[in-house]
Structures are given as C-alpha cells and as structure tokens.
C-alpha cells in the first residue's frame, strides 16, 4: 500500500481517558497532523475516535493515541479499519 493513500480507522481508547483533556488534545494533534474525523466520550468511560489520514500520518496519530495527554493512562486501544468516508475537519462530539 502506498503511504499517500487514505486510510480510515475507528479507534477505541480505554483507561483513564475522560476528564484529562484527551478529546481536546486529540483534536489539537489531529489538526496539526491533518487528520480528519471526530472524537467523543462513551458512557463506559472510554473514548472513541473516527480518523482518516494517509497511512504514514495515521501511524503517527495512533502513536499519540496510545499515550494521550500527560494525565491520561491508556490501558487498552482497539483499532478497526473501515471504508474511507472522505471526512472533513476533526470535530469534538458530545
């Protein structure tokens, strides 16, 4: 696969990821990298991210997601590839 092709992932991040600025920081990093998609808190305490970017950029974004912002404690992360939807912007959903 060429590194400039767009990939789509649904990312579920579990651990101490709510109330620590995870969503705001994810948006900041996504905006810096040029990732499109959205981030939202789930009722079970996890965070879900839908992201689209080139494969190379996605790897960098996933590396950040595994750590999150400083107060976060990521214990588990699931990445599920999906069909590209040509998303625009990166939104924080509530």
Image (cartoon, rainbow, N blue to C red):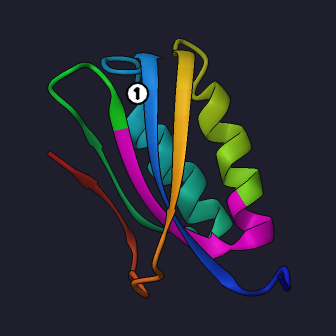
Does residue 65 sit above or below 20 in this rendering?
below
Q: Is residue 52 magenta?
A: yes
| Relative image position of residue 3 (x, y in whole percent) | 84, 79
Vertical relation: 2 (above or below) 41: below
Identify which residue is drawn at 40% across, 41% down: 24
Q: Residues within 10 Å of mark 1 (few under 14, many from 20)?
A: some
Mark 1 lies on residue: 21
- The segment highlighted magenta reads 48-58
Characterize the magenta stretch by its predominant secondary structure. Answer: strand
Percent coordinates x, y for residue 66 in the rendering:
64, 31
Q: Residue at x 66, y 47 (%)?
A: 62
> Residue 90: which quarter of the image?
bottom left
Horizontal arrangement in the rendering, residue 9 relative to residue 7 (left or right): left
Q: 26 above or below 16?
A: below
* Quadrant of the frame with the N terminus: bottom right
Quadrant where the C terminus lies? top left
Work out whether residue 69 or residue 55 is closer to the camera in this orientation and state it: 55
* In front of the other: 28 or 75: 75
Q: Is residue 92 left or right of residue 49?
A: left
Asked if the stretch drawn in magenta spans residue 49, the answer is yes
- Give residue 74's position: percent from left, percent from top: 55, 18
Numbered disc 1: secondary structure: loop
């Amino acid at each position: 696969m060429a590194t400039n092709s767009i990939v789509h992932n649904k990312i579920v991040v579990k651990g101490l990821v709510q109330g620590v600025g995870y969503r705001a920081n994810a948006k900041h990093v996504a905006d810096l990298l040029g990732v499109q998609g959205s981030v939202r808190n789930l009722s079970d305490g996890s965070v879900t991210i839908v992201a689209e970017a080139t494969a190379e950029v996605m790897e960098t974004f996933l590396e950040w997601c595994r750590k999150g912002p400083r107060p976060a404690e990521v214990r588990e992360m699931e990445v599920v590839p999906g069909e590209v939807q040509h998303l625009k912007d990166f939104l924080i959903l509530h």
